[in-house]
Amino acid sequence: MKKIIKALKIPAIAILLVTSIIACDKEFYVIESDVLGKDNANFNTKFEFLPIISYNKKLDSIQINNLPSNLLGYFDDPEYGPTTASVITQIVPTSFNPDFGKNPVIDSVILNIPYYSKAVSIDEATGNTQYSISDSLYGNKDANIRLSVYENGYFLRDINPDNLGEPQNYFSHASHGTTDNFARTDNSLINFDDFAGNQIKDTVFSPSSNAIETWVISETDTTKTLSVPAFRAKLDKPFWKTTILDKEGGAELSNSNNFKNYFRGLYFKAEAINNDGNMVLLNFGSADAKITIHYTKEDEDDATIKTQATYTFNFLGNRLNTFINNYNIALTNGNKTDGDDKLYLKGGEGSMAVVELFPTPEALNDFIDDFRISIGDNEYLKEETTGDFILSKLINEAHLVIYEDEGINAGGDSDFHKYDRIYAYDVKNNTPTIDYIIDPTDNAANPLNSKVLHLTQRDTIEKSYKVRLTGLLNNILQRDSTNTKIGLVLSTNVNATTNVEILNSEDYVTGVPAATVISPRGTVLHGTNSSNSDKRMKLKLFFTEPK
């Protein structure tokens, strides 16, 4: 067995082929001759369906701070209905105890927050890079939204006062039938509209993929620089003079803690215009995400000599998303006993699916008895050096077969769900599955084409997905793993594996991948109890056994 596997490892294309068949399961090297034995050169390959149950899990009060990115705008999902996302964020000076010089006068205050963009071409006429933001823009790309920027009056704490050893987390409270934006802590409800202070910007805009042009004009020269597409706006100069420049020498600008208590951040409130709009993913963590005060100061000895200077803030403090949902579908927790007909995967404060492998102890015991070598009295043969159980059959591949509901509303757009990715995670430990970890097809630059062996891309013909769980089943058999519950969510970035907390969870689902919180779209799948028996979710297992 070992020689056969090694013989297949020579050409690169063979590696990919073998990987796709056996899901890169390294455990086959452990099995080798112990499984089939030297005299068992002849064997059969078979398949079977293993028992599973899948059901819905409604996502209430999910963590909305410390997200990798943030959504801003209005998105009307054709199946689920509209969601409005706003952002509350602290800002932090990049330096403290500033000296603004003699008689400083603000020239402009520029807000710049990059979109997630990618270079797609070069303009032959100008030589400039052309960008696309289509991967992070949702909804009507030709519509506008109203954006109001307020001074935030609510103090975003870093430490939980009820438990000084823990950070302060904030959780969603997706209000319905209101325009206000709410969040929760462990024991309080916050309405950020009640804490909205001075309005420092009121604008109507739609995200653009155009590069940002910056012009620098001096007495002798004019230069233009280009940067990546971003939300860019001029802010009110008098506000920043009073709030920042006039505080020179004061405690307010002396350190980060004093500043955060004095200036508690900004509230970016998004609203639809005539029930239409779009939603964009903003990169607040970028080095180019900042507020810059451009000002002119006089020379200390000669008032006719002017010098230009800047004072800059970044967004590296606490930051959170809020959501207002007005769904067409009532999302509920599902039937854990019989499974559900349809599974609703919706990002934000939405819904996920739980898949229970071997939903009864008897089903798990039957699986173990069938694949391990029994030595009697519920004991099984183990490999002496590793302690792993020795198997009587070799698992070649195991995967979930998942079909999309053919009746889902795509708003007349045949490509609406074309690029959907389903992400599977270990619910017990809030971690990626072993199959995710051993999948070598990482693509950091293009998440759509990343982890495609474990989390296959959507089959646009069959409207289906596969989630390979070969490694997980081998861990159950060989190492007594108890990770038999898998969470399924919709994700726009399967490379992002960090989980966030569910507030006061009353069951074993205590966290969800952060990527699904910032994935605004939704889909509907057939469950294990689907009325369409041909489309029911299944766990299909291919295995080899001696003749």
Image (cartoon, rainbow, N blue to C red):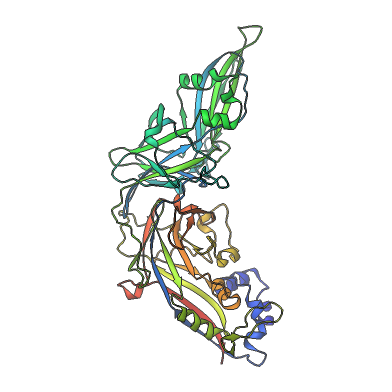
Is 282 displayed left or right of 329 in the figure?
Answer: right
Q: Position of residue 269 (x, y in %)?
A: 39, 36
- Residue at far right of view: 385
Q: Is residue 415 visible?
A: no
Nearer the observer, 511 or 168: 168
| Residue at the spot 37% in from the left edge and 40% down from the top edge | 181
Above or below, 141 against 233 in this view is below
Q: Position of residue 199 (x, y in %)?
A: 40, 27
Work out which quarter of the rendered image holds the N terminus and state it: bottom right
Nearer the observer, 412 or 163: 163
Nearer the observer, 507 or 486: 507
Q: Position of residue 244 (x, y in %)?
A: 53, 22
Q: Position of residue 105 (x, y in %)?
A: 54, 15
Is 457 displayed left or right of 39 in the figure?
Answer: left
- Residue at far front of view: 162
Above or below, 124 against 540 in this view is above
Q: Is residue 253 visible?
A: yes
Count of numbered labels shown in the rendering: 0
Work out which quarter of the rendered image holds the C terminus and state it: bottom right
| Residue at the spot 46% in from the left edge and 47% down from the top edge | 64
